[in-house]
Amino acid sequence: MDKPLLQIALDTYDLPSALGPLQKAHQYIDVIEVGTILCLAEGMHAVRIIRSLYPDKTILADVRIAEAGSIISKMAFEAGADWVSVVSGAAPTLTSPTAPTLWRRAARCRACRWCSCRPAWRWARTTASPCVPTRRRR
C-alpha cells in the first residue's frame, strides 16, 4: 500500500501570495496543488514558475477539466504539471477520442465531484484512465 501524500493547495489570487507559504512548507509536502483560483488568475505561468522552483515535487494543476480535455491537459502538462483535475460529471465525455492527450500524459488525474464520488469511481473502473477519484468537502 502506498503511503498517504501530503498536499498543499495554493488557492491565492496571485503568485507572490502563493510562494510565501510554499517556501515555508515545501520540505514537508509531497504534492503542490496550483489551485483553481491561481490557475485562473495567473494562467499556466504559475505552474511553470512552481515547476522551476520545485522540480522534484509532484504538481497538480487544479484546472477542473469539464470540456476541451485534450487542449487543457496539454497546456497543463507542457507547463510542468504532473496531474490535472477533472470534474467527474464530465468524465464520460473525456473518454471520447477527443482526450487521448489526457490519458497519454497523465500520471494521474483527479476526478472531483461535490456530492458523490460514485460516478467517478464507476468511470475509473470501466475506462483505461489513470484516474484517482476524490471527494471534496463542501
Image (tube, rainbow, N blue to C red):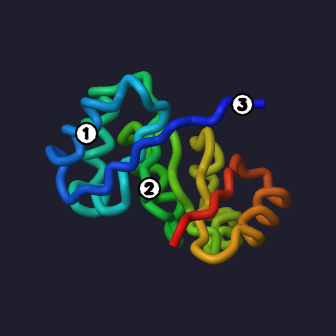
Element type at mark 2: strand
Residue at the location (63% across, 77% down)? 115
**Which numbered dot is residue 91?**
none
The answer to whether 19 appears left or right of 124 in the picture is: left
What amino acid is at disc 1?
Answer: Pro
Q: Position of residue 64 (x, y in %)?
A: 48, 64
Picture residue at 58% right of the left edge, 50% below the top: 101
Residue at the disc numbered 1: 21
Alpha carbons under labels 2 and 3: distance apart: 22 Å
Dot 2 or dot 3: first in sequence order is 3
Residue at left offset 72%, top offset 51%: 129
Q: Amino acid at mark 2?
A: Asp
Earlier in the chain: of badge 1 and badge 3, it is 3
List x then y, in percent, for residue 136.
56, 64
User: Which residue in the protein does label 3 denote?
Assistant: 2
Residue 91 coordinates in the image, percent (x, y): 66, 68
Estimate how packed mark 3 is, as few (under 14), some (14 to 19) or many (20 or more) residues with alpha carbons within 10 Å.
few
Quarter of the view holding residue 50: top left
Q: Give the labeled residue for mark 2.
A: 62
